[in-house]
Image (tube, helix red, strand yellow):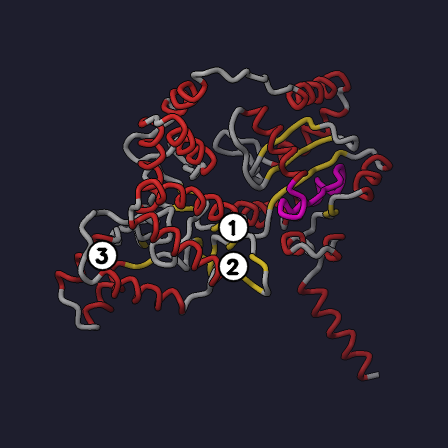
Amino acid sequence: MRKLFFFLFLSSLLWAEHPYTNALIKERSPYLQQHAHNPVNWYPWGKEAFEKAKKENKLIFLSIGYSTCHWCHEMEAESFTDEEVAKLLNADFVSIKVDREQYPQIDKKYQKIYRDVYGKRGGWPLSIFMTADKEVFFIGTYIPKEEGYGSKGLLNLLPSFVSLTKESSAFQKAIEQYKNIATQKTLQTKLSSNIMQRVVKKIEKEFDRTHGGFAKRPKFPESSKLALLLDIYRLDGNQRAFFMAEQTLKKMAQGGLYDQIGGGFFRYTTDEAWQIPHFEKMLYTNAELITVYVTLYEMTGEKLYKKVIDESIAQMEKNYMQEGVYLSASDADSDGEEGGYFIYDYTKLKRALKEKGWKPKEIEEVLAYMGIEEDGNIDGEFSQPHITSERVPVKLEAFKAYLKALSAKRTFPF
């Protein structure tokens, strides 16, 4: 009898820890497993979910993301663990979770729809609302729980979608609008002798002459565009193409987009000057950029680009290779803090270096060179290292070794 009570007690503890469990519990994807205990009754992509939607006359909510996506975590914390949102979703929708790394073809399909609808690239999480026959009538990225800052929230949108289905003509019109966009065929352009010049001219309109890159913010590396510019230079000798590519690649290599201590590139920066990154590192981002930097190094022989290549490859081998395969990404958050593994406190560093016997001038030189300031560029408190000068301090390598040792004591963000 005592054993029975003990078993029941343990069962109650497990139930208390996870009051909800959905169909994702059977999935192998780490991203889907993260959502297995949401109150939202998630299903994996598959026949079962769509048949259920048809049988019960429900809409589909498709959410696409991946395990290290910061805003995917944010949307889960704000909405998918919220019982009010879950109640609305479970009542009138069949909710499907997709790991973009498991089903890249599904992600590609709906990212194209987003790009066609809004005229810009999408992102993650990608949020799609559609019928059981996969006819899209609304698409977005991160959707907050509640309305604010000019954006509708899930608590507004979900009931409005249900109401829309009851207005047959309006609902069909919404479906047709998305269907027309999705089926538009890309215009085929015949190659002409001056096509490369026209491409360069078009890219120049987007180019940031001060900081490099092709947008204001957020700022992505856009490796394919950089590779194209270098190819045009190699084929046509176009100096404008080379200037845009090298200016961008140099600024990126010196900026906070590049991990100046550990090597490798973050996914994007939130500012125009490449200083403040979103701290995810993606395997594909680094693989693409390493190739572009190899091309640039072959053209210029600049040591900076060789350093970037070597450090980026080394950090991928060290942190991302496990059991003979590469992990696809690392998280933005470490120990509950965004960028916690990569950022530093000016006052603490200054004090620590002083205790190690460094001279005040040596300390100020390395801190200034690496952009580590008292009112740091991360929340006005911490600093993300980035190169601020062409003049290299004598103690730079010793300083970087010290920062590496500090980072080694932190939790790497997987």
Amino acid type at mark 3: Leu
* Residue bearing the label numbered 1: 283
Q: Which percent across, then down, holds residue 410?
A: 42, 66
- Is 100 magenta? The answer is yes
Residue in the picture at 34% in, 51% down: 306
How far apart in space, not on screen, are marks 3 and 2 (Cα)? 29 Å
Is 334 above or below relative to 269?
below
* Residue bearing the label numbered 3: 367
Is 132 above or below relative to 389?
above
- Is 169 magenta? The answer is no
How far apart in space, not on screen, are marks 3 and 1 (Cα)? 30 Å
Amino acid type at mark 1: Leu
Mark 3 or mark 2: which comes first in sequence? Answer: 2
Q: Is residue 99 left or right of residue 295?
A: right
Q: Which percent across, then down, holds residue 15?
A: 72, 65
* Residue bearing the label numbered 2: 320
In the rendered image, the quadrant that contains the N terminus is bottom right
Tags 1 and 2 touching, CB below 8 Å: yes
Numbered range of the magenta stretch: 85-104
Q: Which percent across, then down, holds residue 113?
A: 62, 28
Judging from the image, what secondary structure is the residue with disc 1 in? helix
Judging from the image, what secondary structure is the residue with disc 2 in? loop
Tags 3 and 1 touching, CB below 8 Å: no
**Circle 1 crowding by C-alpha within 10 Å: few under 14, some 14–19, many from 20:** some
Residue in the picture at 33% in, 37% down: 246
In the rendered image, the residue lying farthest to the bottom is: 2
Q: Which percent across, then down, holds residue 174?
A: 68, 21
Is 75 above or below relative to 172?
below
How far apart in space, not on screen, are marks 1 and 2 (Cα)? 8 Å
